[in-house]
Amino acid sequence: MVNGVQLEVSKSNLIALRYAKHATSGTHLDSATGLENSHTVIQAPSTLARRYMSSKSSPGLYTRLLIYSAFQVAFISFLLSYYNVQPLSYLSRRIRESQVWDHSVDALRDFLEPIKEIYDDVVDLIDVYDDDDDELTRNPRKSRKRREVKKESEVKKVAENSEKVDISKLPVLTREQLTLFDGSRPSKDVYLALLGRIYNVQKGSKYYAPGGSYHFFAGKDATRAFVTGDFSESGLTDDVRGLSEEDLLSIAEWSSFYEKNYELVGLLQGTYYDAKGKPTPRLQEVKKLTEKANEWKKAQAKENEIFPPCNSEWHKDSGRVWCSAKSGGVQRDWTGVPRKLFMPVSKTFRCACVRNFGAPLSEFPGSSFKKNRGDLDNPNVLEYENCHPSSISCQLVKT
């Protein structure tokens, strides 16, 4: 310890230091063993230091080695450049072909998954919808599995409570009257409508008032835009015809959100309520479609257990789909291989991880427990072009 700094000393340095110490104390050390030798003539510390330093390699040797290495690097670089060889591209291609990268990514994902689950559990203990950031904190939390279960029960509960509200006592506004509550008049609160139900969103005026990020929702019913993201004049409409089951469920979540966090202050005359505030046939139709969407979601969850969605990544001109033991958020004891899974009704397809060994998980004509091919023979399953049948990863080219 010198001036509070710990020094690490090699064996040769220790011997040299002991030389110096014993030279001043009247004893001498053998240069090979470092042991005391009282019969040897004592030498001055300066002589010992010169002997020790002379045993080290010459600085010129290091210089020659560096020059030789530099020439080697320059020569190899010249050869690579002359023959247009790109070692990094070659190594990258070989790694992709051998699927080492895929396994590394999957291993990293498997390592991070428990950490993410712990984080999600902590977040679930926090009230996401605080008074100041209702809208800003909502969307980033939408996809968490634990919150989905909680949200689904909340949507059902809020929907039941909304049915119990006596809407006959609520005022009915026309579209022209609702536009007066767009936040541009200091004397009036900010209103918006969703599926014909009008909410007072004044406490979130920093989002809905002019200049706010959600001002385009103020003073109108723009139900469709909540799920399409089309904020043009034609997109800000209450017409939900043609929306998918997933979109209808998202609208139900938004409806639950406003029922829970904002005051219901009226009804909008038009698509969903008449001039007397009574529900129109169109509203009943949307409710039935939402019920069917819930049934679809349950069936989809069951299908995902058999055909879990693939992992995917996309770039400008290409993409990749791959499977892992947790792809699609479905924990299982098999990985599967990427396949196109066609939907019989819509005739569209999605990427699914298909079990490629053992008995099939799905039921289809000609399925057999003896073939040891899993679900590969399902007629709705098709291989990706230019992808090896047993590969867990497929490179895709955008067309």
Image (cartoon, grey):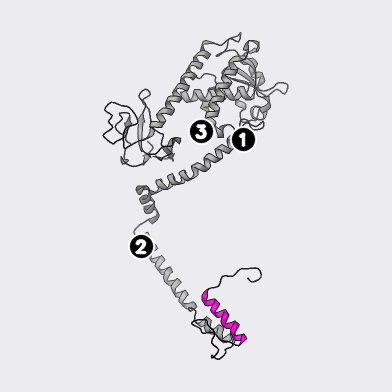
Q: Position of residue 290 (x, y in %)?
A: 49, 19
* Closer to the camera in the image, 318 or 283: 283
Question: Would you say 326 lies left or right of 135 here?
Answer: left
Q: Is residue 346 visible?
A: yes
Q: CA distance from mark 2 to mark 3?
A: 55 Å
Q: CA distance from mark 1 to mark 2?
A: 61 Å
The amino acid type of the residue labelled 2 equals Leu
Q: Which residue is mark 1?
A: 126
| Residue at (38, 24) in percent of width and height | 346
Q: Nearer the viewer, mark 1 or mark 2?
A: 1
Classify 10 Å Cα crowding around label 2: few (below 14), some (14-19), many (20 and above): few
Q: Which mark is residue 145?
A: 3
What element does badge 1 sit on? loop
Classify 10 Å Cα crowding around label 1: few (below 14), some (14-19), many (20 and above): few
Q: Which mark is residue 79?
A: 2
Is residue 6 a member of the stretch shown in magenta? yes
Q: Which mark is residue 32?
A: none
Q: Position of residue 73 (x, y in %)?
A: 41, 65
Is 76 located above or below residue 145 in the figure?
A: below
Looking at the rendering, the stretch of residues picked out in magenta corresponds to: 1-30
Query: Sequence order check: which comes first, mark 1 or mark 2?
Result: 2
Q: CA distance from mark 3 to mark 1?
A: 15 Å
Q: Position of residue 99 (x, y in %)?
A: 37, 47
What element does badge 2 sit on? helix
Classify 10 Å Cα crowding around label 3: few (below 14), some (14-19), many (20 and above): few
Query: Sequence order check: which comes first, mark 2 or mark 3?
Result: 2
